[in-house]
Image (cartoon, rainbow, N blue to C red):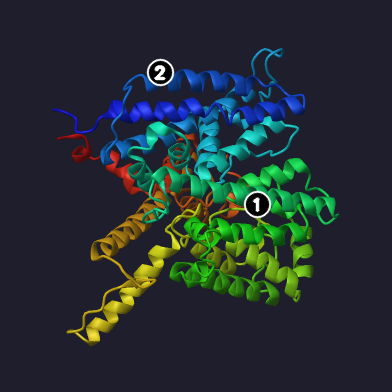
């Protein structure tokens, strides 16, 4: 049997990406040095990624990439960077000799499954964590900065970044970006695909710098006392990729209302198609509000925010007493009930923050929404399946797919009443090809089926090991990892973690995060015989 895929060419390009991963690893090195911490976790990783990268590069000196090689290269790249990304966690947790590295033998990241979970969650911008103790006492500022940085690198896409800066990826770059970019497709903004990649990353970098500056300005102005320069950088690196990792155990709840209001529009921007910002910056300022997908996206956020605010304002959005085993206590519930119920600003702020955070799959939390009532929690569970725009950094199904589905359902109802009518489905004045519509239906059905299968498997595995896991918790864990959302409900809530799952369950969720980030089909196709055989 002769393989139909030039795997050597694919792995050679994976090597190119891994080799240059050593460059961003220098950032936590500088951070560790600045705070007097050990740099061994990063020095070891730099040496490893350069060695492996150079070795893989030599498999095919002049790689030729077509669609099949593109699928393999993208899938293998995300696995490879996640494996490399776990190395700093393992080195820090196990420790080298004291002269080389700090030792944290008590760290949960000493378990390779936990380290890989945290790394994959970072690079796929899921934001789910196995860290029970998020503090600088248990983990150095260097390692926490690496944790934040993995999300920023994965947000716009590692391969998209590689296409933007590596000449060897300019040929075949379109196939690579289509295989990696979130959503049904990526708009070619310029004649050369490398220039398009640079334009997208330029907008992404610009928003990140702007948010960091504004967050620190709030601190300087006295509106955010604990928003230090470190925290401003850390949260700027995880907002725009819709990642949600925070060096604070209480996420954005740890900061003032001014910070929470400031983060909301940046999460909205992160869930918007970045191509629209390019059009605005090049003089077409009205393009953003003429875009049908953006209007539907903004309207959806407004509706979910209004429903959530109504539930919180009237008090029906909060539980009346604390269920056993929850991550908050009666005093916490009473404090929020006293401010939110009947309080227009807090109710609107927390509803808007959680609606935007969940729809865009950012995963930040302005409060522990385990304290929300069942109707409010099911509203958030519904929001987990919406997702950001195509061409954004958001995960899940994507708002454009739901828009096309609703338009096609409306078309079906119309043609049922008027059998002779010909009515194409249009998106922003453009007719959508029927094959594209069928593809959207197929993806959405596959996504929902995979969600239910994942829920059943996670629940079964929890039962096997005696883990107390409700159906809602299993559903939210499956939806959060597959959709790259991050937090769920109950034990996997915004102030909890995924540490209680078995290693087998964590490995399964790692696969869900990987498949979800690459939109399932590019991953599943790698496991079909037709892909490999001639």
Q: Are marks 1 and 2 in contact (CB under 8 Å)?
A: no
x then y, percent, for residue 356:
59, 62
Q: Name the residue that disc number 1 marks.
A: 325
Disc 2 crowd, CA 10 A, few/some/many (<14, 14-19, 20+): some
x then y, percent, for residue 211:
68, 52
Q: Which quadrant of the figure has residue 315? A: bottom right
Along the polypeptide, which appears first: circle 1 or circle 2?
A: 2
- Quarter of the image with the N terminus is top left
The answer to whether any part of residue 364 appears in the image is yes
Q: Could you tell whether 274 is left or right of 356 in the image?
A: left
Residue in front for this viewpoint, 62 or 392: 62
Disc 1 crowd, CA 10 A, few/some/many (<14, 14-19, 20+): few
Q: Could you tell whether 65 is left or right of 362 in the image?
A: left
Q: Name the residue that disc number 2 marks.
A: 55
Task: Classify mark 2: helix, strand or loop.
Answer: helix
Q: Is residue 247 above or below residue 57?
A: below
The answer to whether any part of residue 460 appears in the image is no
Question: In front: mark 1 or mark 2?
Answer: 2
Task: Classify mark 1: helix, strand or loop.
Answer: loop
x then y, percent, for residue 88:
59, 26
| Point 79% across, 44% down: residue | 228
Q: Is residue 149 above or below residue 394?
A: above
Q: Is residue 56 above or below residue 165?
A: above
């Amino acid at each position: 049997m002769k393989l139909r895929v030039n795997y050597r060419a694919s792995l050679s390009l994976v090597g190119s990406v891994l080799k240059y991963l050593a460059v961003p690893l220098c950032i936590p090195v500088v951070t560790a040095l600045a705070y007097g911490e050990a740099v061994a976790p990063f020095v070891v990783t730099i040496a490893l990624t350069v060695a492996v990268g150079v070795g893989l590069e030599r498999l095919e000196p002049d790689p030729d990439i077509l669609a099949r090689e593109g699928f393999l290269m993208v899938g293998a790249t995300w696995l490879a960077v996640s494996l490399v990304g776990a190395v700093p966690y393992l080195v820090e947790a196990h420790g080298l000799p004291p002269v080389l590295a700090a030792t944290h033998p008590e760290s949960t990241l000493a378990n390779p499954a936990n380290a890989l979970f945290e790394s994959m969650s970072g690079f796929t911008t899921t934001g789910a964590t196995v860290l029970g103790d998020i503090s600088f006492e248990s983990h150095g500022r260097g390692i926490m900065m690496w944790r934040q940085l993995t999300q920023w690198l994965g947000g716009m896409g590692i391969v998209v970044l590689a296409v933007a800066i590596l000449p060897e990826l300019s040929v075949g770059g379109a196939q690579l970006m289509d295989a990696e970019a979130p959503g049904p497709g990526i708009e070619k903004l310029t004649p050369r695909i490398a220039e398009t990649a640079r334009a997208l990353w330029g907008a992404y970098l610009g928003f990140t710098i702007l948010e960091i500056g504004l967050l620190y300005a709030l601190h300087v102005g006295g509106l955010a006392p604990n928003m230090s320069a470190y925290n401003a950088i850390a949260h700027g690196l995880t907002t725009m990729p819709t990642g949600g990792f925070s060096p604070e155990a209480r996420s954005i709840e740890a900061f003032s209302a001014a910070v929470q209001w400031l983060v909301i529009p940046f999460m909205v921007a992160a869930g918007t198609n970045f191509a629209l910002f390019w059009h605005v910056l090049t003089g077409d300022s009205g393009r953003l509000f003429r875009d049908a997908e953006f209007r539907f996206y903004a309207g959806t956020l407004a509706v979910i925010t209004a429903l959530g605010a109504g539930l919180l304002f009237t008090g029906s959005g909060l539980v009346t007493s604390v269920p056993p085993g929850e991550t908050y206590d009666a005093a916490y519930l009473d404090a929020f009930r006293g401010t939110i119920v009947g309080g227009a600003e807090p109710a609107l702020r927390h509803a808007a923050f959680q609606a935007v955070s969940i729809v865009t799959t950012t995963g930040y939390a302005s409060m522990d929404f385990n304290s929300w009532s069942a109707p409010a929690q099911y509203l958030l569970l519904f929001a987990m399946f919406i997702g950001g725009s195509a061409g954004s950094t958001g995960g899940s199904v994507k708002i454009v797919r739901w828009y096309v589905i609703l338009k096609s359902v409306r078309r079906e109802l119309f043609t049922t009443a008027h059998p002779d009518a010909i009515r194409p489905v249009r998106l922003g004045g453009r007719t959508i090809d029927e094959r594209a519509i069928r593809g959207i239906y197929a993806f959405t059905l596959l996504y929902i089926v995979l969600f239910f299968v994942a829920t059943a498997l996670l629940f079964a595995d929890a039962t096997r090991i005696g883990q107390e896991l409700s159906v809602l918790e299993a559903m939210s864990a499956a939806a959060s990892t597959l959709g790259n959302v991050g937090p769920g409900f109950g034990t996997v809530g915004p102030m909890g973690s995924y540490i209680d799952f078995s290693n087998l369950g964590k490995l399964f969720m790692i696969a869900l995060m990987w498949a979800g980030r690459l939109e399932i089909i590019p991953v599943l196709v790698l496991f079909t015989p037709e892909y490999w055989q001639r």
